[in-house]
Amino acid sequence: MADNNSMNIYEKEAEEMTAMRKITKQNKFERTEGGFINLTFDGVTYERVKVVRLFPFTDANKYISIRQNDDKAREIGIIEDMDELDDDTRSMLEEQLRLNYFTPVIEKIHNIKDEYGYAYFHVKTDKGECKFAINMASNAVTKLSDSRLIITDLDENRFEIRDVNALTQKERRKLDLFL
């Protein structure tokens, strides 16, 4: 049985992990020479922080989690709304988010081939032509709405179809297996 001292340590750690700390424009973000971002919050400077969207598809510019760059990725605090930040800070954070959430948009489906439990896609995206594969047994295709899809390939790259209805009837038939 744990003694009171170690219970206090666990309770304190749990309290720290669940506390929500708000990051505002009064806190200072700085770009490093290497292109990373440091944050000074409550008198402590955190180096190379991670910038994470808590609601990446439904509220992309709200509730941005800023985390330490360590194995546990402990949360330092949350930015409730990016629009409340100054232009330079917002631009710096948006750049980091673009790098973390690179999601090409599928504009055209050339082919989808189903073989041995995998689907092989050949598509045109807003970033160019691409081929990727998904595991048919996994949850690789996520419906965000009746017409919007996120497809996650075997390497955990994400692709978006913003509006299935904007595709041709032939392209939609190729997707029928996933809808």
Image (cartoon, grey):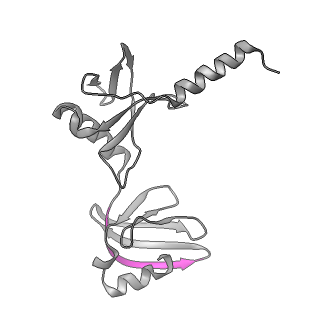
Outermost residue, left side: 87
Q: Position of residue 143 (x, y in %)?
A: 44, 67
Residue 108 lies in the magenta-colored region: yes
- Range of magenta residues: 105-115
Which residue corresponds to the image point at 32% horizontal and 49% vertical from the top-left? 60
The answer to which of 28 and 106 lies nearer the viewer is 28
Which residue corresponds to the image point at 34% horizontal and 75% vertical from the top-left? 164
The answer to which of 98 and 65 lies nearer the viewer is 65
Residue 141 lies in the magenta-colored region: no
Q: Main secondary structure of the magenta part?
A: strand
Number of residue marks = 0
Toward which corner of the image does residue 77 lie, by quadrant? top left
The answer to which of 119 and 46 lies nearer the viewer is 46
Figure quadrant of the N terminus: top right
User: Looking at the image, is 9 positioned above or below residue 37?
Assistant: above
The answer to which of 156 and 28 lies nearer the viewer is 28
Q: Position of residue 29 (x, y in %)?
A: 28, 25
Q: Position of residue 122 (x, y in %)?
A: 40, 73
User: Looking at the image, is 13 positioned above or below residue 73?
Assistant: above
